[in-house]
Image (spheres, rainbow, N blue to C red):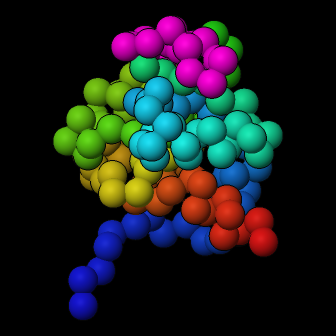
Amino acid sequence: MFVVEQDSFSDQQISEILSLTKVAVVGMSKNSSKAAHYVPKYLFENGYDITPVNPTTDEILGKQCYSSISEIDGEVDIIDVFRPSDQVLPFVVEAIKKKPKVIWLQEGIHNPEAEKLATQAGIKVIFNRCMLAEHKRLSQ
């Protein structure tokens, strides 16, 4: 049987993390058919304060886009990452400087080196999970 690696957080811990509302979305897409668009759109429609991070556009869902995490003003609770696993490290290094409570690597994304750095900095790391799927699953 093929076992997909995933973080070891309990449903209660995931629920507590999902109660945080300020979410920066790295790699948010303008393309509505991509998960990197419809996942944050779902979160936005469910009361989350979404901040898109995408250097290729100025605005998504009527919200100002930032070129990088470090350009975001104010605090961020969760940095939600939609980038391939092998491209995650520089975003996590930048995210650590922002001191979020959580770095969430979306479904299919897993980078042990980046996760270790964030964990050593005192940041919780969720990996290989979808925020939309977890929100739906735990809010029933």
Q: Position of residue 33 (x, y in %)?
A: 45, 43
Figure quadrant of the C terminus: bottom right
Image quarter where the N terminus lies is: bottom left
Given the current orientation, which residue lies at the most extreme bottom position? 1
Q: Is 117 left, or right, of 126 in this rendering?
A: left
Q: Which residues are magenta?
A: 55-72
Queried whether the magenta region covers residue 64, the answer comes back as yes
| Residue positioned 77% across, 65% down in the render | 139
Helix, strand or loop for the magenta stretch, by majority: loop
Which residue lies at the image location 39% right of the left edge and 13% below the top edge?
55
Q: Camera-side residue: 77 or 23?
A: 23
User: Looking at the image, which residue is at 73% across and 56% down?
Assistant: 16
| 6 vs 90: above or below | below
> In the image shown, does 136 or 19 lie closer to the viewer?
136
Q: Position of residue 81 (x, y in %)?
A: 43, 39
Nearest the eye: 56 or 114:
56
| Viewer-closest of 40 and 105 | 40
Left or right of 91, for residue 86 = left
Look at the image and tell me whether residue 70 can be seen: no
Residue plotted at (44% across, 12% down):
57
Q: Is residue 94 visible?
A: yes
Toward which corner of the image does residue 136 lie, by quadrant?
bottom right
Q: Is residue 130 magenta?
A: no
